[in-house]
Image (spheres, rainbow, N blue to C red):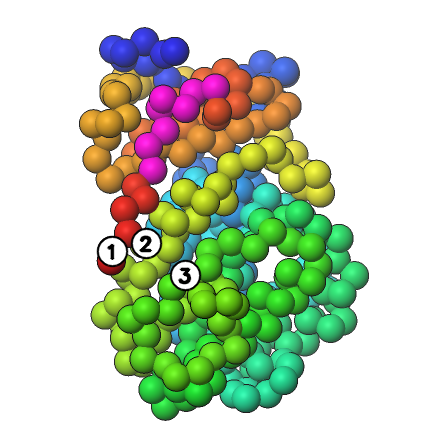
């Protein structure tokens, strides 16, 4: 167990020896995509969009996870032809779509997802990868086909053997029917930016908290994911020491310390978006440090 007083960490930069296999660098030195690869980001966020609303939702989800956990949202159109390589960079995927081809049996999104569902994606080897779906729709004007495309997105990934997360209650929505319902729940986070825009941020916050509580960020590094990128530097990185208070998790407010485990070095980097420190061993060895806000609104 860590001391209960103060832990001295290398906040701006910390260079490990060869066994550690990675180097922390201030985020302003590299681009956002490079930063996520450097820190061993767990969650890749991918979306299709026609008007930009789904991208806005993806941005909210990424912000809720934090840029130390999730990638910047990536439009599916940008990675056609390299989908396998892009998905392989992440332990878990959050994927989102709008619905335009309402009532259609297949290819309902009207986005780049339709172009790869039954071609490039059919050959993906992503069995066991954690996936959560989100989608947008109009639950009033298209109340009988609310967010139908989200159901297809879910089914394509499920058919590839992925572990699906993030099912939510249908309570509080205005729809009559939806092809995105599995059992008695939606197959992911559904949003209505037309009729219930005021609920979007709360729904995103609660959904991400629920994903974390379900273990979306937990577990071993996926077998089909390459190790986090190593950064070699010929010049020593300046070491700036910062003191961080390590408190009993019960007293931590809304910010949760989330651990990022590097299997090569057997070290875990912890961050809540404002503070960070490093411990030896996997996250479960330091469970007393982790607190996740999983309180959901009724």
Identify the disc placed on residue 297.
1
Q: Position of residue 233 (x, y in %)?
A: 58, 25
* The C terminus sits in image quarter: bottom left
> Where are the magenta residues, as a range?
285-292
Please check the rendered image and state whether residue 10 is part of the magenta-colored stretch, yes or no.
no
Q: Earlier in the sequence, mark 1 or mark 2?
A: 2
Whole-Å distance between the Cαs marked 3 and 2? Answer: 10 Å
Q: Earlier in the sequence, mark 3 or mark 2?
A: 3
* The N terminus sits in image quarter: top left
Does the residue at mark 3 contact the one at mark 1 (Cβ under 8 Å)?
no
Asked if residue 230 lies left or right of residue 54, the reply is right
Q: Position of residue 208 (x, y in %)?
A: 39, 51
Residue at 51% over, 37% down: 218
Q: Earlier in the sequence, mark 3 or mark 1?
A: 3
Q: Nearer the viewer, mark 1 or mark 2?
A: 1
Q: Helix, strand, or loop for circle 2?
A: helix
Does the residue at mark 3 contact the one at mark 2 (Cβ under 8 Å)?
no
Q: Helix, strand, or loop for circle 3?
A: strand
Please check the rendered image and state whether residue 289 is part of the magenta-colored stretch, yes or no.
yes
| Between 296 and 2, the one nearer to me in the picture | 296
Identify the disc placed on residue 168.
3
| Between 130 and 244, the one nearer to me in the picture | 130
Q: Main secondary structure of the magenta part?
A: helix
Asked if residue 202 lies left or right of residue 73, the reply is left
List the residue tagged with mark 2.
Answer: 206
């Amino acid at each position: 167990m860590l001391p209960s007083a103060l832990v001295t960490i290398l906040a701006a930069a910390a260079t490990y020896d060869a066994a550690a296999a990675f180097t922390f660098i201030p985020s302003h030195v590299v681009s956002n995509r490079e930063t996520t690869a450097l820190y061993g980001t767990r969650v890749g966020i991918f979306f299709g969009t026609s008007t930009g609303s789904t991208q806005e939702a993806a941005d909210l989800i990424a912000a809720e996870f934090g840029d130390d956990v999730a990638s910047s949202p990536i439009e599916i159109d940008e990675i056609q032809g390299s989908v396998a390589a892009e998905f392989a960079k992440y332990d878990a995927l959050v994927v989102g779509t709008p619905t335009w081809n309402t009532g259609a049996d297949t290819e309902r999104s009207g986005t780049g997802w339709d172009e790869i569902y039954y071609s490039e994606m059919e050959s993906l080897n992503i069995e066991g990868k954690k996936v959560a779906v989100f989608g947008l729709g109009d639950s009033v004007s298209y109340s009988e086909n609310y967010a139908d495309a989200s159901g297809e997105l879910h089914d394509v990934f499920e058919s590839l053997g992925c572990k699906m997360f993030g099912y939510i209650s249908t309570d509080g929505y205005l729809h009559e029917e939806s092809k995105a319902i599995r059992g008695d729940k939606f197959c992911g986070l559904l949003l209505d930016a037309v009729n219930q825009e005021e609920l979007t941020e709360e729904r995103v916050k609660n959904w991400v908290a629920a994903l974390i509580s379900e273990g979306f960020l937990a577990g071993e590094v996926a077998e089909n994911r390459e190790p986090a990128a190593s950064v070699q530097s010929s010049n020593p990185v300046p070491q700036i020491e910062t003191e961080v208070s390590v408190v009993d998790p019960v007293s931590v407010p809304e910010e949760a310390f989330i651990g990022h485990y590097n299997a090569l070095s057997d070290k875990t980097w912890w961050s809540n978006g404002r503070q960070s420190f490093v411990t030896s061993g996997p996250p479960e060895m330091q469970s007393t440090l982790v607190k996740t806000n999983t309180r959901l609104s009724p």
